[in-house]
Image (cartoon, grey):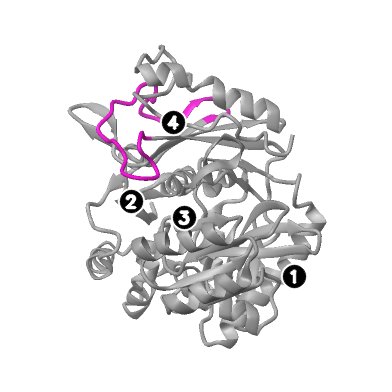
Amino acid sequence: MKEVLVIGNGGREHSIGWKMRGEGTNVLTAPGNAGTAAIGRNIEIDPEDVTRIAEFAQKLNPYLTIVGQEGPLEKGIVNEFSERGLPIFGPTQEAAQIETSKIFADSLLKKYGIPAPESEGFTDLSLARQYIENYNKPCVVKADGLTGGKGVEVCDTKEEALSALDKIIGKYGPKVVIQERLYGQEASVLAIVGKTELNEPALLPLLPAEDYKQLYDKDKGPNTGGLGGVCPHWDVVSREELREVSQKILIPTIKALAAEGKPYTGILYAGFMKTKDGFKVLEFNCRGGDPETQVILPLLKTPLLPVLMAAIKGNLDKIEQLKWSNKTCVGVVLASEGYPGKSVTDREIFGVPNRIELEKGILVFQAGTKSKDGKLVTSGGRVLIVDSIAENKEVARQKAYSKLASLEEVKKGEIPDGKIGFLNGHYRTDIARRNG
């Protein structure tokens, strides 16, 4: 039986492992969580210790390694594996800069005329302050590097922007991008990117998805890594518009990276705003989104492993169109008290059996979980996601929420039998309701 090594420890990696397991492979996850341990074997290696992981993979010789998290990509895990002749799906350290450096991404988009908000990158605090003073319009201040989706401040006034600048630089360092604030509807489009036999860039777009970034209902509060998702997101991105996004943004971006000597293989994630002037890129990620991956993969009927192998072998153009379920998947994230700041851990989690599928159409992917003294407990900020697959968004939404203990119950730590929850757990109550 083929073995697949998945790098990461979140819900995204749990869902990738679940998909691989369903395709008849043995799954190993480094380092994994309590959920991934139930579908395969966890490997206790720091995912950013790329040399140690590569040495382990050289002994194991897996059929494929799939990188879920961005940190190892920034550290050059794909470069390390490639030098050793080990098959791995993900972009090189150089190509991963599309996420790991917003200043790099900003420059690339400008150079190649890819639709994006007006923006400027800065490495000098005084110049950044001066820019905000003169800009005097609503803007978004973003840390340059990796922040787990939390290094972003949306500002309505100059005073808010200056305060956000100090906050971000104090926490994440001196490099920032200041971006025009756009208004419209957001969507995420992920694509599997590889090459053709002629060594030309190629991609297969996945279904559009919707992410819920802010901590509280109605998109209030601080940014998080994502507290829920919906797929497909046809409300904002129609099938025709998905083709338009591919032709005008995704393909030009991977061609631009190739032209810069940074050919891209892996998942390319583009977060968009649909404005009155068309789609514009808000951000790129160099891996699958979380929680988008968890609501996209349950709808994919096509076996994933052969597609990823085609991407790295240079014959992605030979893959026929991906096949999808015609249903909708809604996912609700249950997070720890304190998230997105310092999260409270070691809270016992109730209602999650030692399997992913609770019942037909209901899946639970684990993220910040571990086993302790024979119990499932919290170990991080975003603890798990409850997915529901149904004939439409509203039914899927109702089924997902029906499995969660109420916020009043989790506040007291009184979790009814058959419900999922833990003391002071938090979730948004408006997932799949943003657009009616």
Q: Which residues are magenta?
A: 336-362
Contact, mark 4 vs mark 2 (Cβ under 8 Å): no
Q: First in sequence: mark 4 or mark 2?
A: 2
Residue 3 drawn above or below residue 361:
below
In the image, what residue type sits under mark 2? Thr
Determine the secondary structure under disc 1. Answer: helix
Contact, mark 2 vs mark 1 (Cβ under 8 Å): no
In the image, what residue type sits under mark 4? His
| Residue at (35% x, 45% y) in the render | 341
Query: CA–CA distance between discs 3 and 2?
Result: 23 Å
List x then y, in percent, for residue 245: 73, 64
Which of the labelled discs sits on residue 426, or is there none?
Answer: 4
Query: CA–CA distance between discs 4 and 2?
Result: 27 Å
Determine the secondary structure under disc 2. Answer: strand
In the image, what residue type sits under mark 1? Gln
Q: Is residue 308 visible?
A: no
